[in-house]
Image: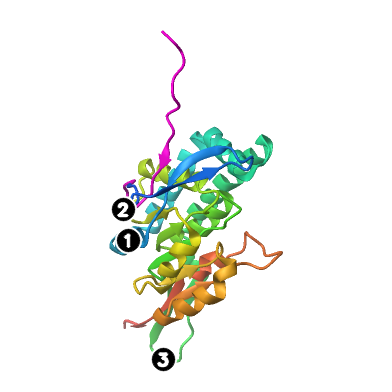
Amino acid sequence: MSDDRLDVRKTYKLLINGAFPRSESGRSYEVTASSGDFLANVAQGSRKDVRDAVVAARAAQAKWWGATAYNRGQVIYRLAEMAESRRAELADHVASAEGVTRGVAEATVARSIDRIVWYAGWTDKIAQVFGGANPVAGPFFNFSLPVPSGVVAVVAPQDSSLEGFVDAVLAPVAVGNAVVALASERRPTPAVLLGEMTATSDFPAGVLNILTGLTGELTPTLASHEDIDGLDLEGAASQADELAASAAGSIKRVLRPRGPGSDPTSLRRLRAFVETSTVWHTIGQ
């Protein structure tokens, strides 16, 4: 029997509502490694896929926020466990996508996993850091409580295929939002691979939705969609002004790309899509 056989080339799917569908348009596009060699076929999402992902996120967000902060942290930590068990595979994809050495790719994966753990640890600390009791002159308490914005669209960084994706996506998820993320157009496979791990990490369907496709085609739909409450434009710097103007029509919170030298470990992203609810309560006698 001959050992010669055809390669089984995978087409990476979207992640919508906990399932892995192909684009409703039936389109896909080729992703090449930094060397120019073929790397993978990836689903080319459409505006209809964006709308489906937003519907899924909206349906999931209240349940996600209704879970205890401890439980949300456990779910995110479970994702770190899954990523740790597949470090070698993630490093292969990062090395191929970003054109870095194996050692650099392994270091990137390690930092990404550490970052997931970092966000898992924040879920039950948000209320203490971003909220508090306010001094008032009267027989009542006044509390400021952080609550999530709702559904957040994230345009992931184009160059940092895994580490940047983790930072952009896990911050809004950790504070209770549901996310529709558009992965890097040129380097989507590490993000999609991480998304596949959510199937076995207890993420409720719809909390994290991952789209792949052409950034210029899908970002206008994300910006103008009236059921999206926040928009992170980290991966769309060249379109930021235009997209922010479009987002203003539905009064979204907009997070613009970080400037050079910004601290990636700051609380900027955790604060970006959190609202403050003020509660008054009488003091019992």
Q: Earlier in the sequence, mark 2 or mark 3?
A: 2
Q: Which residue appears farthest toward the right when viewing the image?
A: 261
Mark 1 secondary-structure assignment: helix
Q: On the image, numbered disc 1 is attached to which residue?
A: 48
Q: Is 189 on the left-hand or right-hand side of 227?
A: right
Q: On the image, numbered disc 2 is attached to which residue?
A: 24
Neighbour class for label 1 at 10 Å: few (<14), some, many (≥20)? some
Quarter assignment of residue 87:
top right
Which amino acid type is shown beneath numbered disc 1?
Lys
Q: Is residue 218 above or below residue 227?
A: above
Q: On the image, numbered disc 3 is attached to which residue?
A: 138
Q: Give the Cα separation between the discs numbered 1 and 3.
A: 53 Å
Q: Is residue 251 above or below residue 261?
A: below
Whole-percent x and y of residue 39? 53, 38
Residue 183 is one of the magenta-drawn residues: no
Which amino acid type is shown beneath numbered disc 3?
Gly
Q: Earlier in the sequence, mark 1 or mark 3?
A: 1
Q: Which residues are magenta?
A: 1-20
Answer whether labels 2 and 1 touch (C-beta < 8 Å): yes
Please report the residue visible at 56 percent of the width from the left and 76 percent of the height from the top.
241
Whole-percent x and y of residue 28? 41, 47
Mark 3 secondary-structure assignment: loop
Q: Give the Cα separation between the discs numbered 2 and 1.
A: 7 Å
In the image shown, does 237 or 33 lie closer to the viewer? 33
Residue 17 is one of the magenta-drawn residues: yes
